[in-house]
């Protein structure tokens, strides 16, 4: 299967902030994941805001990550923790 690499630093910049930017990146990922495995490479990313992370990680359909259609590479420990946090919060809210 085809693999597409997305580099947010090149399209958004080294600071990933704001819901609008997170939503645009999520939509780009979803479009590409329809026909390929997508690798989102966080190389060169300096900052990820909680609102950006919520739009990207929190609203990304869990099944495409679980099926390994979308993978994340080069993320710092802080970005990984933020991603887990927003996904966990959304899961808790959905359960209530």
Image (tube, grey):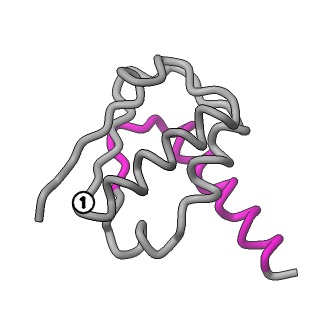
Does 73 sit above or below residue 18?
A: below
Residue 50 part of the magenta-drawn span: no
Q: For this rendering, which residue is in front, 31 or 11?
A: 31
Quickly name the residue at label 1: 37
Stretch in magenta: 71-94
Q: Is residue 64 left or right of residue 51?
A: left
- Residue 15 x, y percent position in the rendering: 55, 19
Q: For this rendering, which residue is in front, 43 or 55?
A: 55
- Residue 58 x, y percent position in the rendering: 64, 57
Residue at the spot 59% in from the left edge and 39% down from the top edge = 22
Residue at the spot 52% in from the left edge and 46% down from the top edge = 80
Residue found at the very far left of the displayed protein: 1
Does 1 sit above or below residue 42?
A: below
Q: For this rendering, which residue is in front, 58 or 12?
A: 12
For the C terminus, give its image quadrant: bottom right
User: What count of labels does the image hold?
Assistant: 1
Q: Is residue 59 left or right of residue 93?
A: left
């Amino acid at each position: 299967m085809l693999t597409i690499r997305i580099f947010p630093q090149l399209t958004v910049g080294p600071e990933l902030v704001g819901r609008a930017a997170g939503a645009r990146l999520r939509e780009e990922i979803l479009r590409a994941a329809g026909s390929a495995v997508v690798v989102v490479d966080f190389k060169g990313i300096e900052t990820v805001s909680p609102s950006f992370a919520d739009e990207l990680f929190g609203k990304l359909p869990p099944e495409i990550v679980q099926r390994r259609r979308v993978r994340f590479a080069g993320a710092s420990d802080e970005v990984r923790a933020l991603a887990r946090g927003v996904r966990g919060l959304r899961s808790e809210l959905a359960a209530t």
